[in-house]
Amino acid sequence: MNGGSLDHLLKRNHEPFDEMVVGIWLAQIVLGIDHMHQRNVLHRDIKPANIFITKSGIVKIGDLGCVKMLSKPDEECSSEYGSPLYLSPEVWRSGTCSNKSDIWAVGHGARARYAHAARQVVSCARKAYFAAE
């Protein structure tokens, strides 16, 4: 693996990634987002193009141009940012987002990209999110 954005890796690689590798990447993504949320930072544009994998397999979350600093962890804010495919239902309904919106984007992106392991990926994301609360 040569590194680059997850979107680029997915487009370049025509074979499914090993489930263990996907699990490791997903765990790192969730831990990175949890790190941001513990500091009241909301990303608002989580998608494969903003997830970077180094040559050694380390995940980095990038494109912090849409970041919103919250005053408290459970705060909601209006959102004019994000990629339509990865927006959570509450953003579509009311234009508001929260930490849960970032988690939605991770789960939705993982489910869409790794349909063969969808139940495990969504289950892992839920467990990680609720464990972080």
Image (tube, rainbow, N blue to C red):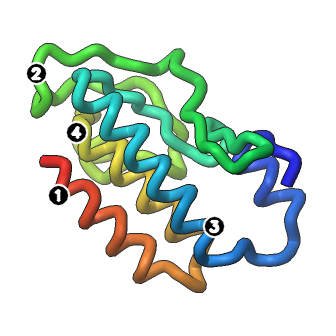
Q: Residues within 10 Å of mark 2 (few under 14, many from 20)?
A: few
User: In the current view of this chain or complex, which residue is farthest to the front?
Assistant: 56
Reply above or below: 132 against 108: above
Q: Which residue is mark 4?
A: 94
| Comes first in the chain, label 2 or label 3 | 3
Question: CB atoms at circles 3 and 4 under 8 Å apart?
Answer: no
Q: What residue sits 24% from the left and 54% below the top? A: 129
Query: Element type at marker 3?
Result: helix
| Comes first in the chain, label 2 or label 1 | 2
Q: Position of residue 28 (x, y in %)?
A: 48, 49
Q: Which residue is mark 1?
A: 130
| Comes first in the chain, label 2 or label 4 | 2
Question: CB atoms at circles 4 and 1 under 8 Å apart?
Answer: no
**Could you give the CA–CA distance between mark 3 and mark 4, rounded to whole angstroms?**
36 Å
Question: CB atoms at circles 2 and 1 under 8 Å apart?
Answer: no
Decide if residue 5 is on the left or right side of residue 90.
right
